[in-house]
Image: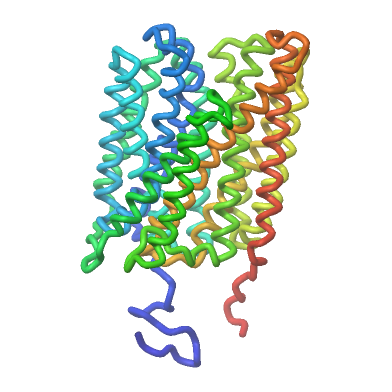
Amino acid sequence: MKAAPGGASPVVDGRPDGARPSAPARHAGWILACVVTVQFLVSLDLSLVNVALPAIQDDLGLSASTLNWVVVAYVIVNGGFLLAGGRMGDLLGRRRVLAAGLALFALASVAGGLATGGWLLVAARAVQGLGAAAASPVALALVTAHFPEGPARARALGMWAASTVAGGALGVVASGVLTETLGWRSVMLVNVPIAAFGLVAAVRLPGDVPRRGVRPDLAGAVLATAGMGLLVLGVSLADSEGWSAPLTLGPLAAGLVLLAAFGLAERRAADPLVRLGLFAHRAVLGANVFGFLITAGQLASFFFVSLHLQQVLGYDALSTGLAFLPFCLGSVAGMFVATKTLARVGPRTILVAGGLTGSLGIAWFGLGGPGGTFWTDVLGPSLVASVGIGASFVAMGSAATTGVPAEDAGMVSGLLNSFRLVGGAFGLAVLGTLATTVTGREADPSSAAAASAGFSAGLLAAACLLAAGALFCLVIPKHRPAPEAGRS
């Protein structure tokens, strides 16, 4: 390091300390192709099987408990390994970890599409979760490592956010269309060409050398993986077993104990899986809490709206899928606005405004009833919610990575993805329990009106989670625009 003239910031390798060069032009396209493909694939798969579940159950003759594991197995394994997957990318090289994760995901998708029994499908879904845990944290880490803070990173984050939200929304669309036209197995097999393209892009990433002289935090990896996995298991079982059931409380308690032990272990680790000091940065803290709450509300909302369309308004699987298209279009609009304004106004303003806008849209969904139509109950709330949520995802990625050195990019990416996934499982379990309770209290619990009442309660609670996340982001420091060139 050498001193910079005029008392400016120190200079390292010819550039200001803490800055990093932009991605070379010949690599930038492939980096963004990897980011978009991986994030789209992982987000798509979180919602892709939802509409197909009844068809899977009928074809394979699954019990209700086994069918639940088709969803839960993916979530548990994915949530358990996200922190380790992100750090592996930092230490072993992002290109090789990303390629390995995509290859594993593709092979598991083939196995799931060819499964002849329930537990074969469950096992394939678990391996999909492992592949996603290796690949997904690397996607955001690539943005942090190769694009400097400012307009270049804002554009890259816009693409990351677009693929995240579009994947989740299109998962519902594709699930209905594919199940209705080609059968449920196509829901698994459609992942293969997407993962294959991601692999083609991954091998064209700039080479990275594994870090030497670093002792992997094996104790932290074991504790974090087991703790996160048990926590997600407990939350996922709460909806079917009840919050006071031993099958729910046991994993929850064990998961919390292991995560507490993980926190203690990280304080002593020479090269920890997660630097606990990251939470002292208010932007990182705000982004992770927001990620937890917005994912909890958004995934539960997708679930309730999908059921409302089919069980209350009488839509078939194909029409239900197509009804989510306005959400996709609105998300693109919100991300475009956020990308253009992020460098000027900062993530705090967009997170607060976007989160509250998304909350209003979700609350509007909750006002629907048995006599509603697409125009009154779906189109309007879809556009309002999607614009706010789309804008928020761009700002969330920016806040989570602000000021983070490139060598820790996988760490913060794994952290944010972990908070989001646990939030999604939490939202589905807690709000699902609320909806079921409200429906059961109606005079005729089997009626469409009773189902609508339960869905409305869940959607209004989801709106409150989004609003709480938006207001929590007020802890993020106010944005200070960079001084204009030529001015002191």
Q: Is residue 33 visible?
A: no
Residue, x 47% and y 63% (percent of image)?
A: 276
Quarter containing the N terminus: bottom left
**Figure quadrant of the C terminus:** bottom right
Viewer-side residue, 474 vs 11: 474
Question: Would you say 444 lies left or right of 203 here?
Answer: right
* Residue 112, percent from left and from top: 32, 21
Q: Residue at x 33, y 20 (%)?
A: 121
The image shows residue 376 at horizontal and vertical percentages of: 76, 22
Task: Report the front residue among 27 and 241.
Answer: 241
Q: Nearer the viewer, residue 11 or 111?
A: 111
- Quadrant for residue 274, please give it: bottom left
Residue at figure coordinates x 63%, y 36% from the top left: 330
Of residues 66 and 214, the one nearer the viewer is 66
The percent coordinates of residue 449 (x first, y second) are 75, 13
From the top left corner, tell me how far across and down residue 141 is, in percent.
40, 54
Q: Quadrant of residue 63?
A: top left
Left or right: 99, with 473 as reference point: left
Q: Residue at x 59, y 35 (%)?
A: 427
**In the rendered view, would you say 8 is above or below 196?**
below
